[in-house]
Image (spheres, rainbow, N blue to C red):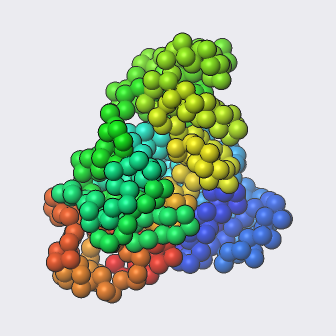
Amino acid sequence: MRVIIVGAGEVGRSIASNLEQSHDVVVIDRNPDVVEGLTYSLDVLALQGDGTELGTLRAADVAEASLVIACTDSDESNVVVCGAVKTVSDAFTIARVRRRTLLETWEGSQGAFGVDFMVCMDLLTAQAIFRISGLPATQDVDTFVGGLVRMAEFEIGPDSPVVDTTVQEADRYDSLTFAGVFRGEEMIVATGDTLLKAGDRVVVIGSPGSVTDFADDIVTPSAEETDEIVIVGASEIGFQAAREFEEHGYRPRLIEQDHDRAREVAEALPNTLVMESDATDTEFLAREHVDEADVVIAALDGDEKNLLVSLLAHRLGVDRTIAVIENLEYTELFETVGVDVAINPREETAEEIVRFTRAEQTEKVAMLEHDRAEVIEFEVGPDSVLAGEPIAAATTDLPDGVVIGAISRSGDLMTPRGETVIEPGDHVVVFADATVLEEVLEAI
């Protein structure tokens, strides 16, 4: 399939890197240095030009394209790209936008602007913040098979009860599979003998109840349900996060320094307590008992500000902090100095678009550790190497770095074991090393 990507920022580069092995990828960008860098770093055709111009699109052979992804940093340009594509091609178009209002306008008139699918960066980030906030110690969380299966990645703290135990010793749950362990730059496929160490990031797949039980057990002391939410910054992401919590029955608090913006969001968020103040004012934070929050979410406009707020929250005694970062290179720094989870909006957006491009092969995709591994859901067909064989035998036809995490049969969850026979029609959730993903997709 020929895929044209307009815009080679973090989102565009991430998508191109993910699709280069399985598709004929063309990347368009205005910056000649960026184009030259892509030429040498990825197996794609990189073109310099303006994706809103028909001449540039024709140079990319848009008439032969099946998919065009517009992911520049300008919402308006992305919409124009999609509209221009529709005048000369039948390609399916995807536009990345930041503003939810634009998404809502498009949703109200499906097919408007020549956009077939629209991805809202701020909304995706807010939804990720909500998912991660619900489980203690989690770095990432997603659901599969319509919510029947949950995947979560946890960091093991030095005082956690499972430190220096094996997976077999830690596995005392009815419907949970230990899939993988990230240890520094190393990725380990979990087996019963895998030893869990402080600082490891462990990926588990199973029923929501079992994942929650595991989350409670690995935290010392046992974590209570997340109730007290404080969001710092009424940026669009902060606003959308507050609205997401409201829609799920929470009553978050939101701190915003700008008077006009504080008033605006207070009127739009009836179940959120909006406080007008500087979030670095320690007297204010103490007076408002921010130290009692279960989680503080830093969603200011600026990575440095979000780092400062997160560190200050930890100093006050807040158990958990989540920070929004625009610069992906800061992720490791933030988490090294004490931020519990750093969320990059562009990474969330790239993941959502890649999910969509794999729709014919998989039901759902979740990327882990900056796409070092993926968790995928698919329906087993009659020609799959997994069909009709016990898992222990069937997986010998799959590359190393693959774990069967969960099976759904007719709406019932099955915990995979070596003797479990997978049948055509089953929905299977698999953990896979990203380096062997294309081989796995061909086999299943």
Residue 208 in view here: no
In the picture, which quadrant includes the N terminus?
bottom right
In the rendered image, the vertical position of residue 65 relative to residue 279, given as above or below: below
Residue 271 in view here: yes
Residue 280: percent from the left, percent from the top?
65, 23
In the rendered image, the vertical position of residue 217 relative to residue 32, given as above or below: above
Residue 301: percent from the left, percent from the top?
67, 34
In the rendered image, the vertical position of residue 285 relative to residue 236, given as above or below: above
Q: Which of the two residues, 68 or 219, is positioned nearer the viewer here?
A: 219
Q: Which of the two residues, 284 or 83, is positioned nearer the viewer here?
A: 284
In the picture, which quadrant includes the C terminus?
bottom left
Residue 369 in the figure: left or right of residue 403: right
Residue visible at 56% across and 67% down in the picture = 185
In the rendered image, the vertical position of residue 245 relative to residue 14, given as above or below: above
Residue 427: percent from the left, percent from the top?
26, 66
Q: Which of the two residues, 19 or 30, is positioned nearer the viewer here?
A: 19
Residue visible at 66% across and 63% down in the picture = 13
Q: How many labels, in total?
A: 0
Taking the view exactly as shown, the residue that stands out farthest to the right is: 32
Q: Which of the two residues, 259 or 433, is positioned nearer the viewer here?
A: 433
Residue visible at 62% across and 45% down in the picture = 337
Residue 67: percent from the left, percent from the top?
56, 65
Residue 160 in the figure: left or right of residue 50: left
Residue visible at 37% across and 32% down in the picture = 226
